[in-house]
Amino acid sequence: MTEQTILKSSASEGWRRSSYSGPEAGSCVEVLDCHPADGVPVRDSKAPHGPALVFSAGGWSAFVAAMKTGGVRP
């Protein structure tokens, strides 16, 4: 899948913050579950008016699964 970007993510409603986000609003991501784009839009919660990247559904699911098991390494 070619990477897609939503330039003005604040135009879409229904963003939800990661359940792993702390109360200090540090490194947080927000996901838009229902979007007409072919994939899963993800944005930085500290920049809600900025762009969002759109990942394939399979790629996003694999990332979430790897994060839950600690399988992602830099």
Image (tube, rainbow, N blue to C red):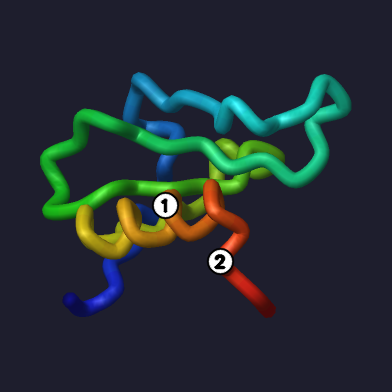
For this view, does 21 lie left or right of residue 18? right
Q: Which residue is under mark 1?
A: 65
The type of residue carrying mark 2 is Gly
For this view, does 25 lie left or right of residue 19? right
Q: Quadrant of residue 25?
A: top right
Q: Which residue is under mark 2?
A: 71
Residue 39: where, in percent of width, then height?
20, 53
Picture quarter with the C terminus? bottom right
Residue 45: where, in percent of width, then height?
63, 38
Which residue is drawn at the image coordinates 47% and 24% (left, top)? 16
Task: Say which label, 1 or 2, has the lower sequence index.
Answer: 1
User: SS at mark 2?
Assistant: loop
| Label 1 neighbour load within 10 Å: few <14, some 14-19, many 20+ | few
Are the residues at dot 1 and dot 2 in contact (C-beta closer than 8 Å)? yes
Which residue is drawn at the image coordinates 43% and 59% (left, top)? 63
Q: Residue furthest front?
A: 69
Which residue is drawn at the image coordinates 20% and 36% (left, top)? 35
9 is higher (above) or lower (below) than 14:
below
Which disc is residue 29 wearing? none
Which residue is drawn at the image coordinates 43% and 48% (left, top)? 42
For this view, does 42 lie left or right of residue 56? right
Query: How many labels sit on residues?
Result: 2
Q: Nearer the viewer, residue 27 or 7?
A: 27
The type of residue carrying mark 1 is Ala
Residue 15: where, in percent of width, then height?
42, 26
Picture quarter with the N terminus? bottom left
| Label 2 neighbour load within 10 Å: few <14, some 14-19, many 20+ | few
For this view, does 65 lie left or right of residue 50? left
Q: CA distance from mark 1 to mark 2?
A: 8 Å
User: SS at mark 1?
Assistant: helix
